[in-house]
Image (spheres, grey):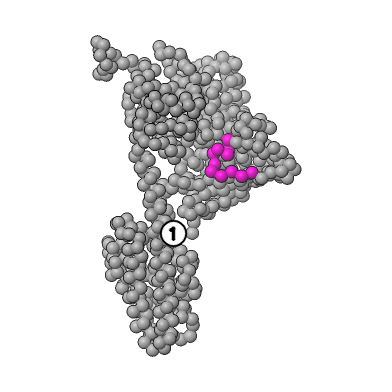
Amino acid sequence: MTHGFPPPATGHVPVLRLGDVLLVTLQGDLHDSAAEQLQQDIGEAITRNRAAGVVIDLTGVEIVDSFLGRVLAEIAAKARLLAAETVVAGMRPAVAITMVELGLYLPGLRTALSTEDAMRLVGGGYADTVARPGGRRPGSP
Amino acid sequence: METAAGVEACLPIRSDMDLVWVRQHVRQAAAQLGFGLVDQTKLVTAASELARNTLVHGGGGRMEAAHVVRGRVNGLRLAFADDGPGIPDLDRALTDGYTSGDGLGMGLGGARRLVHEFAIDSAPGAGTTVTVTSWAVRPPHPREVV
Amino acid sequence: MPEYGAAGQGGSPAREVGEFLLRRRERIAQRWADETLFRTVFTVSREEAVEAGRAVVEALAQVAGADRSADPEAPGFLVVRDQLARIGSARTRTGVTPSQVSNDVDALRPPTVDLLVADLPDAAPEAVREATNVLTVLMGTLRLVVMETALSEGQALIDRQRLQLMEVATPVIKLWDGIVAVPLIGTLDSARSQIVMETLLEAVVDQQARFAILDITGVPTVDSLVAQHLMKTVAAARLMGAECVVSGIRPAIAQTIVHLGLDLGTVVTRASLADALGYALRKLGTDIVTEASHGAGER
């Protein structure tokens, strides 16, 4: 390659355990196979740690295309089958606007402004205050 | 005169690693031509979708990037070409939800919404070329003194 | 710089003019520095004006030398295009009309012609006339180039101002910890809707606002395009972890929305900004305490 770019982040994305929550921080440009690997790693980590929640931090992610969108949706679906809840946190405005334009609404995913908010969400507490998948939310507490 | 250096390129699309290079090149070129952050993101995302199409459905190919100018506005034109089987039914391929591979079916139709101009040239057996162009319509960047 | 008096030794009139310009560039630039165009644009120092003039004279010399005196696209002009654009737009910004700028450029011609004639004392009248003609054409071309660059600078200025206006018209207000709002006033077109969306979502991140209110009380009409933008904003906010509430839908607009068959589906709407604020506060667990039974008092 003739480019002066730093080599893209390859290899696998670490999955951290904080109590009964798994924290995954995506950074930079994720390579397809790394994303698929991550999907598998999270599944295994949930079972191994009996995790109740998965927080995926997207603060450092510059684009989400349909491939990564599908990976996120599948992680959430799989986690749900394993009784864990997934929250995607810190998505940048430009990324969100682009995803909506692309037609990726990720209806099954819960979202939060920051990892802190996300941790609180999956750790219980005010679980109903952020948009739930699929519209109408229950009346205020 | 213009800052075309570093924009023009022809990149191979042979592996998912190449997709990363395509995205990085488009990001850098769009930034250099004065695209705003949201427009950069849209263009990079469109490029990612189209490059993946080239890889998955066209069996690999290449992307050519070119700097285009209309009046005082800079534009970036990206052409994704493969020598694959071609697309038999273009209208259907551009419909949301249509997919022949394993995506969310957003590929072509979605990418089209992310760019200003979109053209597709394909015939069964003759490969596919998708050409997209976006314009840096909001130039908050000061012009460089030559 | 040595200035040779001899002139007219062979060569085309165009080339001769080119040589004259190069030879006398210092003197020409000095003369131009006193003309309105340079005097009013380069106000810092006379030296600055002379230097700018010298660059323009050199460019003209190159254009004449290439025998392209009548061609505004001549490569020689490229070098000074930015310089000329700055001169042209600096003039128009002070409120001078384009035709006046044109006159200003034209005023550079007589002193230059005078210098040319003075430079050819021994040349045949025929040769002097030809050289003067070339110079006149060349100065006319310069005028065209200045006008052209000034006008396109003007367009760029209008574009910039339009953008600034749209940004000014989109103030994001923090209503409470975790609640931001944009009161929209005036017509929403596609470009403005885009800016509203970006501004609001940026504020959501900056303020870590869990609620964003889009108040459309001041928006006269909502067509399907605007409705679509509203829905996109709501969807993008949700992806970021915030909830977007649309308030201030007047009865007439509600009527239009129903008529157009638009489905605002999952969008949370409230009649007024106050209602939307109340909704968001309740969701944040900050209920409004009403003293006695009149109005909603806040602290």
State yes or no: residue B68 in magenta.
Answer: no
A39 left or right of C14 in image: right
Tag 1 subunit: B
Quadrant where the C terminus of chain B sits is bottom left
Visible residue check, residue A59: no
Taking C110 as reference, is B42 above or below it? above
Most foreground residue, C106 or A93: C106
- The quadrant in which residue A5 appears is top right
Q: Is residue C21 above or below residue C150?
A: below
Q: Position of residue A3 (x, y in %)?
A: 56, 48
Between residue C26 and residue B75, name the one nearer to us: B75
Residue A13 picture quarter:
top right
Q: Is residue C278 visible?
A: yes
Magenta region, residue range: B110-120
Residue at screen point 37% across, 40% down = C167
Where residue C64 appears, as percent x and y from the top left, is 46, 74
Q: Amino acid at mark 1?
A: Val
Q: Residue at x 53, y 43 (%)?
A: B116
Give the residue at x 56% y 26%.
Answer: A72
Direction from residue B122 to residue C222 in the image, left or right: left
